[in-house]
Image (cartoon, rainbow, N blue to C red):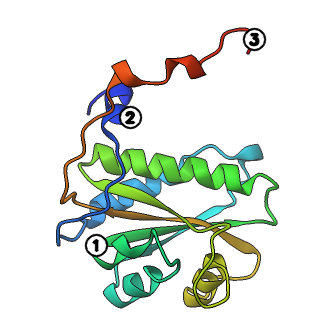
Amino acid sequence: MESLFELLKTRRSIRNYLPKAVEKDKINKITQAALMAPASKRSNPWEFIVVENKPTLLKLSECRPHGSQMLVDSPLAIVIIADKTKSDVWMEDASIAAIIMQLQAQDLGLGSCWIQVYGRENTEGKTAEQYILELLNIPDQYSVLCILSIGYPDEERKPFDTEKLAIDKIHFEIF
């Protein structure tokens, strides 16, 4: 395992995947890591829908007109949802769980990409969220934050160059 800093440096959005299934033990590690994510008042409003079925991945890829098409060739998607009745900060809690899944995937040699769902439109006159709620039969008290596409990378992305980081965005004591 590399250091957290190296993991963060090398984790980049991957949109092209090899046609290779993600092993069950890796899926289990990714989802279990998410279950350890911090949540406000330990409300744990997040839940996760693991999708490997190709026809369902194809339908998920149509949730938005742009930005979700990589799901067609992705061997795995995890839909991040949250029960809005459990927490007023469900979005923050679900976001933390999602990034933990992405970091765990990276640590396992997998690539991932966050596909924003909440607040995005669908081409069928509804929101991307409504489309997914209906598609996956998700109860009404849940909201869909995002989908993570996950798989073995079929592209190479350069790590962040720490010399080019926007250090001027860091402030000490006052703005």
Q: Are there few (<14), some (14-19), or many (20+) residues within 10 Å of tag 2?
A: some
Which is nearer the eye, 60 or 160?
Answer: 160
Q: Are marks 1 and 3 in contact (CB under 8 Å)?
A: no
- Residue 164 is left or right of residue 115, and the answer is left
- Describe the element under mark 3 as helix, strand or loop: loop
The image shows residue 42 at horizontal and vertical percentages of 71, 47
In the picture of the structure, the residue carrying the numbered disc 2 is: 8
User: What whole-number distance in Å separates the C-alpha atoms at marks 3 and 2?
Assistant: 27 Å
In the picture of the structure, the residue carrying the numbered disc 3 is: 174
Dividing the picture into quadrants, the one containing residue 173 is top right
Dividing the picture into quadrants, the one containing residue 135 is bottom right
Q: Are there few (<14), some (14-19), or many (20+) residues within 10 Å of tag 1?
A: many
- Describe the element under mark 2 as helix, strand or loop: helix
Q: Amino acid at mark 3?
A: Ile
Residue at screen point 62% across, 43% down:
38
The image shows residue 129 at horizontal and vertical percentages of 64, 76
Q: Which callout, 2 or 1, points at the residue further toward the start of the chain?
A: 2
**Is there any visible trace of residue 16 in the rendered image?**
yes
Residue at screen point 68% across, 47% down:
39
Question: In front: mark 3 or mark 2?
Answer: 3
Q: Are there few (<14), some (14-19), or many (20+) residues within 10 Å of tag 3?
A: few
Looking at the image, is 55 positioned above or below residue 169? Answer: below
- Residue 65 is left or right of residue 73, and the answer is right
**The N terminus lies in quadrant:** top left
The image shows residue 10 at horizontal and vertical percentages of 30, 37
Q: Amino acid at mark 1?
A: Pro
**The C terminus lies in quadrant:** top right
In the picture of the structure, the residue carrying the numbered disc 1 is: 75
Question: In front: mark 1 or mark 3?
Answer: 3
